[in-house]
Amino acid sequence: MQHALHTLPDWLAALEAMHPKAIDMGLERVAQVRSSMGLEFTCPVITVGGTNGKGSTCAMLESILLHAGYKVGVYTSPHLLRFNERARINGQMATDEALIAAFKEVEAKRNGISLSYFEFTTLAILHLFAQSGLDAVILEVGLGGRLDAVNVIDADVAIVVSVDIDHTEYLGDTREAIGFEKAGIFRAGHTAICSDPMPPQSLVRHANEIGADLWLFGRDFNYSGDKQQWNYGGRSQRRSGLAYPALRGANQLLNAAGVLAALEALRDRLPVSAQDVRTGLMTVELPGRFQVLPGRPVVILDVAHNPHAAATLAQNLDNMGFHPYTYAVFGAMHDKDIDGVIEHLKKRVDYWYVTDLPLPRAASAEQIKQRLLALNCIAEGQDTDSAIQTFHSPMQAFNAASSRAGENDRIAVFGSFFTVAGVMEARNS
């Protein structure tokens, strides 16, 4: 396959076409290739799963460990603008050259085994990390946990941030079914953390059955705080006078508490000082997670794409103070619970600018418009054509909203990574 592949886009295009299924659950093929590659880590590995909050958790862990002077590798997905975002070493995106070299290694060792785009690129990035002399590796689960390619690596500490309904066609349609899939990243004899205040019984049961050391929020770790600062309390470690995370949003203290529980569990191998924690939390950055851009009108970028995330976005919008009008730039995948997302936000949005997205999985703008009409998202006295407008791209939708919004209004961009990425590209160009 690799003869005519010279650039990173060449490789990515070839990988997308290589396997018959975009998502192919199961670890057998990945485990075979991992074995032939001899992929092992001697440093601590932290795997992060859950429905929402994974990216924030990975970013906080990375920021604290970097401030403590460790060499850290972080694997996240999906990316917003460039594939290279998925692999960070010491806070820097991997270069095209490093990724291509890792792709060549997977290609040389897969022995004809068919791998999906996600499986192939996951193995490549794991190989890159294994060659980089790291002190810590942070891996974000792509989908679910038990059968996700990331789970081919045994984690020293596994965090399940939250459990809610998403990806039902792969994971089941109840929190109990999904909780079992998420708990698949736990390992016998190793720390298993759940930051969700209401963990599914399936997750607790699985952790206990395999003999994982389960840390539950509210039982094994907790937080308290006032408007100025907050405190963490774990099994044997307390941290007080902490700065609030620089990431905005109602759930970030829950995420941060899970991060500090993981660091408490690893304190003998990766000690971090109180100042490392404070500075790491104060300076953490993560694009597209309730990211409020400077300027007027206020623009909020949020990759919320399921009802659980939409409820958090709604709460965060409520906490922002008064804005005369809120404009939504909204595009989503057709296999998501679009109605569930809309229900949480319809009372906060005055004008909907809905958009097509550039891939077959996306719902069309017209389909989303019909859902908005069915859910009665037009205020009394509003003109339908004014309240809900359709566009072919996030850029067009955003430009239209920007031209109409007053300087005291706000524009919320949400529904998918692709919606947010489309607007980010428009603003960067």
Image (tube, rainbow, N blue to C red):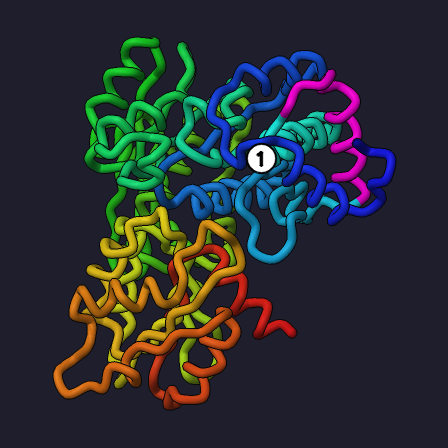
Quarter of the rendering occupied by the C terminus: bottom right
- What amino acid does circle 1 point to? Phe
How packed is label 1: few (under 14 Cα within 10 Å), some, or many (20 or more)? Answer: many
Instruction: Decide if residue 175 is on the left or right side of residue 118.
Output: left
Q: Position of residue 218 (x, y in %)?
A: 21, 33
User: What percent of the width, then of the height, locates residue 407?
Assistant: 39, 89
Q: Residue at x 38, y 87 (%)?
A: 405
Q: Which residues are magenta?
A: 97-114
| Residue 107 is one of the magenta-drawn residues | yes
Above or below, comparing residue 399 to residue 150 in the picture: below
Q: Quadrant of residue 219?
A: top left
In the image, 187 versus 336, the foreground residue is: 336
Q: How many marks?
A: 1
Residue closest to the eye, 226 or 359:
359
Q: Which residue is mark 1?
A: 118
The answer to whether residue 315 is left or right of residue 429 is left
Query: Is 400 placed left or right of 428 in the picture?
Result: left
Is residue 147 within the magenta segment?
Answer: no
